[in-house]
Image (spheres, rainbow, N blue to C red):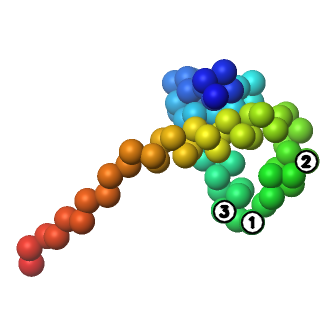
């Protein structure tokens, strides 16, 4: 996965992107959330390979793996 996902300050503000493209992991997730299939994404964005798409999803999953959500109650 490390070979496929890059984050550079000068590229999309440092957002993680598929290497060799200006397509962010965030954009891939937005496409999937809007109902696009992996096949549709690959067809619409030929610069993305299936390995790059898979790496983007793996990156997103690993990024959220140790996320902690706190239920903070603010006194009224």
Residue 31, position as x, y percentages in the image? 71, 56
Instruction: Count residues near mark 2 (Cα–Cα under 10 Å), then give few for <14, some for 14-19, many for 20+.
Output: few
Residue 23 in view here: no
Q: Give the image location of residue 60, x and y in percent.
A: 56, 44
The answer to whether residue 7 is left or right of residue 74 is right
User: Disc 1 to disc 2, how far (Cα)?
Assistant: 14 Å
Q: Which residue lies furthest to the bottom in this view?
A: 76
Whether tag 3 and tag 1 are in contact, CB under 8 A, the answer is yes
Q: Residue at x 8, y 73 (%)?
A: 75
Q: What element carries label 3?
A: helix
- The residue at the point 80 percent across, 58 percent down is 37
Q: Nearer the viewer, residue 27 or 40?
A: 40
The mark nearer the N terminus, 1 or 2, is 1
Dot 3 crowding, Cα within 10 Å, few <14, some 14–19, many 20+ = few
What residue sits right under mark 3 in the picture? 33
Cα separation between marks 3 and 1: 5 Å
**Mark earlier in primary sequence (3, 2):** 3
Mark 2 = which residue?
Answer: 43
The residue carrying mark 1 is: 35
């Amino acid at each position: 996965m490390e070979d496929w996902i890059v984050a550079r300050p000068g590229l999309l503000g440092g957002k993680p992107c598929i290497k060799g493209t200006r397509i962010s992991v965030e954009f891939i997730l937005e496409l999937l959330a809007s109902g696009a299939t992996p096949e549709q994404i690959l067809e619409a964005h030929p610069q993305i390979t299936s390995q790059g798409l898979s790496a983007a999803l793996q990156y997103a999953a690993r990024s959220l793996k140790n996320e902690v959500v706190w239920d903070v109650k603010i006194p009224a």
